[in-house]
Amino acid sequence: MLRRQALVYLVGASIQKLIPFLLLPLYTRLMPIEEFGNYASFIAFLAMFSLLVGLKPDSYLLSSYSRDGIAEFNEKVTICVILIPISLVVSFPLILLLAPFFFQHIDYLTLILLVLFSSLLLAFIQICSVLLQIQERAIYLVSLQTLSILVANGIGVTLLYWNDTWSSRVFGDLVGSILLAFLLLKVIKPHLKLVEFANLKNALTSALTFLLPVFVHVVSFTFLNVGDRLIIQSLLGADAVAKYSVAYMFGMIVGVFHDSFLKAWNPYFYSKVIKSLKDERDVNRHARIYSLFSIILGVMVGGFFSVVYRLVLPTEYHGVEYIIIIVSLAYSLEGIRKVYSGYLFLQNKTRIIAKIALASVLMNVLLNYILIRLIDLDGAAIATLIAFLNMMIFTVYYSRKSRLEFQSTLE
């Protein structure tokens, strides 16, 4: 079952990543390099603030499903939906405050409205996607996601022929998200239930107790993914962001393999690891095999696409090929970290995860500001690799300690 689910997610994610990837030569020619840089900066900004809206409850719901009854699980799904508008209101002042710092010469009203509406849709889609993962409806999920990607890119390319600005492409992405959210409504409907007002406070408090430490980790990890673009924007400008972002996208291709595997791995891990000591040891053996495969895959994929990059991109994007190899290796390390982090989530040790992530992101910010000034865009990629390595090492260390504690409950 794990292999079949992983294969479905791999095929689906590959198609979804392949569509915008194959369109890169077209996008880089339709959009002036500065507008492509502004689009990349918007996506980085959205990635940061979409986490504030809904607090990304996937680990919370996955761990709840493996422990709780269906009634309690449905209540937690409902609480996660209620958290979306609450967190949207809370995040609004922060978006207003930080937008002018990272963006110049952009219509701020358009920027803020697009960030808020997109974040709302992404939070809802996240909850629905977790429900489909739990139900092991991989084919249905990837089919809807692929349809959304096709619509988003089709509309984006069409709009760019009339208006070659960053907002045209964002509007295409927004239409794709609206379509996906609408199609997922029937997935979440059976899980929604009325929560008595008297119990609402306790239910929200319980959810936030789990989610806030994880949220620190998720925000930190996301900043590791996209924060360098915001720093590059402030130090070097939109043209540099465009070059770095395109190279980064090539390096992230290896992440398609890891994310596809992990969508199947998480339900497998949480369901099998609690059965017996023998099953737990089987899970750990699979994690070790995957770790070795991950490193080899990162080097091979990074090397291959660093060659492809020069063949398909305009000459103004050349000169950053080494970034692809560095980023590919960084994402392979992240794949290893995610496989081992399950033991910490299983025992609710989310504070450890948060501390590791926060320390890594602070290191990343410091290294970015130092290395970008010293060695330009390569410095940003090296800072990312060092931070991901730090997260992987400490996560594996603390997960092994948690594993020993967990094994004692199975004996």
Image (tube, helix red, strand yellow):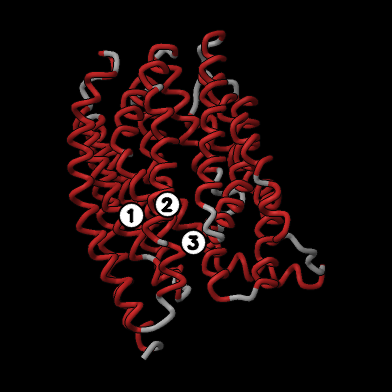
Residue at which label 1 appears? 360
Q: Is residue 97 above or below residue 397?
A: above
Q: Amino acid at mark 3?
A: Val
Q: CA distance from mark 3 to mark 1?
A: 15 Å
Mark identifier at residue 32: none
**Mark toward the start of the polypeptide (3 vs 1):** 3
| Tag 2 secondary structure | helix
Q: Position of residue 59 (x, y in %)?
A: 50, 62
- Image coordinates for residue 113, horizontal then vertical, percent: 65, 31
Note whether residue 273 is visible: yes
Residue at 53%, 72% (x, y): give it.
66
Residue at position x 64%, y 75% in the image: 69
First along the sequence among labels 2 and 1: 2
Residue at 62%, 29% in the rendered image: 175
Q: Nearer the viewer, residue 111 or 236?
A: 111
Q: Secondary structure at mark 3?
A: helix
Secondary-structure class at tag 1: helix
Question: Can you tell which quarter of the image residue 167 is in?
Answer: top right
Q: Are marks 2 and 1 in contact (CB under 8 Å)?
A: yes
Alpha-carbon span between mark 2 and mark 1: 8 Å
Side of 41 where 368 appears, left or right: left
Q: Residues within 10 Å of mark 3 (few under 14, many from 20)?
A: many
Q: Residue at x 56, y 19 (%)?
A: 168
Q: Quadrant of the N terminus?
A: bottom left
Kindly identify which numbered label has been placed on residue 214: 3
Residue type of the residue flagged with mark 2? Ser
Count residues near mark 1 (Cα–Cα under 10 Å), then give few for <14, some for 14-19, many for 20+. Answer: many
Look at the numbered discs 2 and 3 and tell me whether their residues touch, using CB distance below 8 Å: no
**Which disc is residue 220 wearing?**
2
The number of discs equals: 3
